[in-house]
């Protein structure tokens, strides 16, 4: 059973939950979401049960009471502060989507905290042409269209067959979205606009695995490829591209978590991985 907690540091509070009994530290930084992930902690623990023997896994929310100008750099600084407060270092960090952006900053600014990073469906720099989907989400949230936001969100991150399966669930869940959650979502979504570490990726000292999707309607495959262009000469950089699993391949591809775990436990020589 996952344990929950709240860390108070530097004048803010951040929720987290943890599970597993291994000696290594596995940090999961989720992507942009409409609601908190902690209420689904049992689902997350089950999905990542394969890491429990080797790792103790920590899943961090965004901080409570975020300011209006909260940036991805701020998110990384806050995550680092919480990790330090919990005594975590040399962590194996997996960041998905916006969480992958946070993970990149974490590895650049706080190398002592990060042993390896796996980056899922993310980008070092979201170009204006790649922001159309996120801008649409912001527009729906600003209108207070909870159902429209949840349906559009699900439609863009999941493959059509998965979206069809969960359409009714999205509609029901949307009814419970609060005004505060909509406001927080808008701030977090807007933060992507000014994010750019493309010129700093070479500062990442630890091994990196980037996992992308060729058909990614949210950021498109060029986002992952921009990471590859910047890190391809790095001897401990690995790239794997999926086909047909949507932006949230980290939730839909059946071998995804095995790939991340194998990368974290291996010496980067496993034939499961391929540079493109």
Image: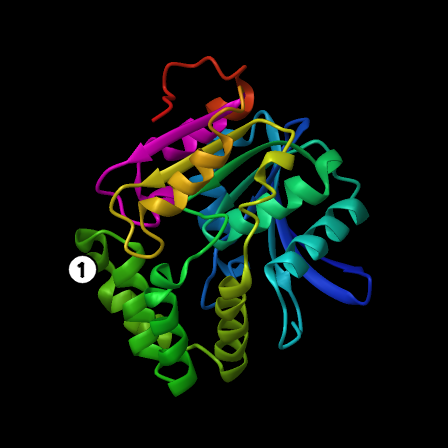
Is 241 within the magenta? yes
Q: Is residue 157 left or right of residue 102?
A: left
Dot 1 crowding, Cα within 10 Å, few <14, some 14–19, many 20+: few
Residue drawn at point x = 53 percent, y = 46 percent: 198
Q: Quadrant of the C terminus?
A: top left
Mark 1 sits on what residue? 164
Is 237 within the magenta? yes
Dividing the picture into quarters, in which one does residue 145 lie? bottom left
Residue 222 position, x and y percent, is 34, 45
Residue 9 position, x and y percent, is 81, 59
Residue 245 position, x and y percent, is 26, 43
Q: Is residue 175 visible?
A: no
What segment is highlighted magenta in the picture?
A: 236-261
Q: Quadrant of the N terminus?
A: top right
Residues 256 and 195: in front is: 195
Q: Is residue 66 visible?
A: yes
Residues 132 and 229: in front is: 229
Q: Is residue 158 left or right of residue 115?
A: left
Q: Is residue 142 above or below residue 6?
A: below
């Amino acid at each position: 059973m996952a344990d929950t907690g709240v860390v108070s540091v530097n004048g803010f509070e951040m929720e987290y939950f943890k599970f597993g009994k291994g000696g290594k530290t596995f940090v999961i930084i989720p992507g942009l979401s409409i609601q908190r992930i902690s209420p689904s902690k049992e689902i997350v623990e089950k999905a990542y049960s394969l890491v429990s023997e080797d790792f103790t896994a920590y899943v961090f929310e965004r901080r409570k009471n975020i300011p209006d100008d909260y940036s991805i750099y701020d998110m990384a600084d806050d995550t680092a502060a919480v990790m330090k407060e919990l005594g975590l270092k040399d962590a194996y960090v997996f960041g998905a989507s916006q969480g992958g952006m946070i993970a990149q900053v974490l590895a650049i600014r706080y190398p002592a905290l990060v042993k390896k990073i796996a980056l899922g469906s993310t980008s070092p720099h979201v170009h204006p042409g790649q922001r159309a989907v996120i801008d649409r989400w912001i527009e729906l949230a600003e209108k207070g269209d909870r159902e429209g936001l949840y349906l559009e969100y699900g439609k863009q991150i999941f493959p059509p067959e998965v979206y069809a399966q969960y359409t009714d669930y999205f509609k029901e869940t949307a009814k419970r979205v609060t005004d505060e959650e909509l406001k927080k979502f808008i701030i977090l979504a807007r933060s992507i606009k000014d994010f750019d570490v493309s010129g700093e990726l070479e500062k990442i000292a630890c091994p990196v695995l980037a996992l992308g999707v060729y058909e990614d309607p949210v950021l498109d495959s060029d986002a992952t490829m921009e990471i590859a262009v910047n890190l391809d000469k790095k001897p401990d950089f690995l790239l794997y591209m999926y086909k047909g699993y949507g932006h949230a391949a980290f939730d839909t591809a059946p071998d995804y978590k095995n790939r991340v775990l194998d990368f974290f436990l291996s010496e980067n020589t496993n034939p499961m991985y391929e540079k493109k």
